[in-house]
Image (cartoon, rainbow, N blue to C red):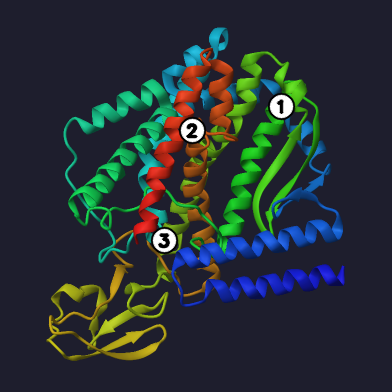
Amino acid sequence: MLYAHMIVLAAVALLYLIINADIPGTWKFGLGVIEMFFVGNLLIKKYSLSGEHGMIMLKTKKGLKLIDNLAKNAAFWQFFADAGIVMCYGLLSYFIMRKHFYWKSALAGFVGLFLVSALVSPMAVPFLAENITGILPAKTTAASSGDTSSFVLPIGLILLIGGGFFLAIMLGLLYYGFTVLYAVVSTLAFGSTAMAETKPGATLLLPGVNLPFIEGIAALIIILIVHEGAHAILGRIAKVPVLSSGIVLFGIIPVGAFIEPDEEYLKRVEKTKQTRVLAAGSSSNLFFSIILFILFMAFLYATVPYRESGLLVISGLEKDTIIYSINGHDATDYQNIAIGKNENVVLDTNKGQMVIKTNAEGKMGIQFYVLDKAMLIARFKFLPLTIIYLILGLSFALNFVIGTINLLPLPFFDGYRIMELNVKSKLVVNGLMYLTIAGFLLNILPHFFV
């Protein structure tokens, strides 16, 4: 075991060096993946662990008794699953559930659908954009605003009611994919800068690369326990044997949790019961995102006296620098502070006093968020509060993101298996799959033009 501990410690040290290296994020990601691939394979071969390609499956039967106990309340969990399917598929769930569509669970599902879309969804993406590097470019203000066309909201509501989050995420992915495709054609055919100015619509989320390392791992563990636990409970209610449970490591990084049902037995179960099992993961993520969002907002309100006030620097100075004052004036009033061209500016920060020189336009070359003008953006005077803030925020936001993305008809996603189970035409299923793959690739493409 001493050898294993040495491997893990060496891997952590090397990953830390990669994360903190002064190289582009794509290089960090690539080097991190290569390291975890080799470390995972080394541990698999040395200790005869289950897994391949650097992915280690640590199996156990310790959680199965808890799953059996929770599954005893079958009526509640079936109601939960039916409501969750309505959240995921809207009125399409009427055709998915066949003779098992009940209006009481449907009503609960639509209430959940509107709560997630009205509360969680509008906050999840901004939180990720403003607290995780590598997803969206930094902004100079904490909030943005814009006019919404009068027809956008009604159309959005119609899509949500008609197809739930499945239809919303599917159409959103394809719409932005066509936007990227237009930018590619414009760049290649006419030499425009459209592609360089187009933001990625999707990215991989990895702790230590574009997620805070500790907080990111904690949030992913919460999400995966919720997701896989719901699969397991509905599986037990459907009398599907559960062979084992456990976690998945990519090298030394937790990237998943799993419940290992008897897949051959599951395939023989009645289709509605199979659908409940498959949809339970995303349903639990979406429902749990509401609970976590309420806890997150309660935490923010309760900790107002302990929050930092100032400008949180995104680029131009050391990471996580907070500027308290500019030339002796409150930094949050930066718009009214007169700064000359080619002038030395004194900044009081959490990392000490700094003196920087403005350029010929009178700008300091710093991008930042204003900490006291947006509830979502916060840093605290005590490190434990910042850690709690990030864990809660990442948990509610990623529960929503992962719960919805998992509905897409992509191989190995629950959404594909649900579609395959409930759509008779294989041509339609495969057509949707290839269309979704194309949309995903287009959404990722802007990463290569940075």
Against 232, residue 303 (above or below) is below
Mark closest to the chain's N terminus, 3 or 1:
3
For disc 1, the marked residue is 235
Tell me the CA gap for discs 2 and 1: 21 Å
Outermost residue on the front side: it is: 189
Left or right, 13 with respect to 304, comes to: right
Against 5, residue 53 (above or below) is above
Mark closest to the chain's N terminus, 2 or 3:
3
The quadrant of the rendering that contains the N terminus is bottom right
Dot 1 amino acid type: Gly
Outermost residue on the top side: it is: 99
Question: In this orientation, does residue 363 appear?
Answer: yes
- SS class of the residue under badge 1? helix
Query: In front of the other: label 2 or label 1?
Result: 2
Q: Residue at x 32, y 87 (%)?
A: 348
- Place of residue 102 in the rendered image (x, y in percent of width and height, measured from the top left): 53, 13
For disc 3, the marked residue is 134
Frontmost residue, 172 versus 233: 172
For disc 2, the marked residue is 408
Query: In front of the other: label 3 or label 1?
Result: 3
Q: Residue at x 72, y 49 (%)?
A: 247
- Place of residue 104 in the rendered image (x, y in percent of width and height, measured from the top left): 51, 16
User: For the image shown, how many numbered marks are present on the structure?
Assistant: 3
Tell me the CA gap for discs 2 and 3: 23 Å
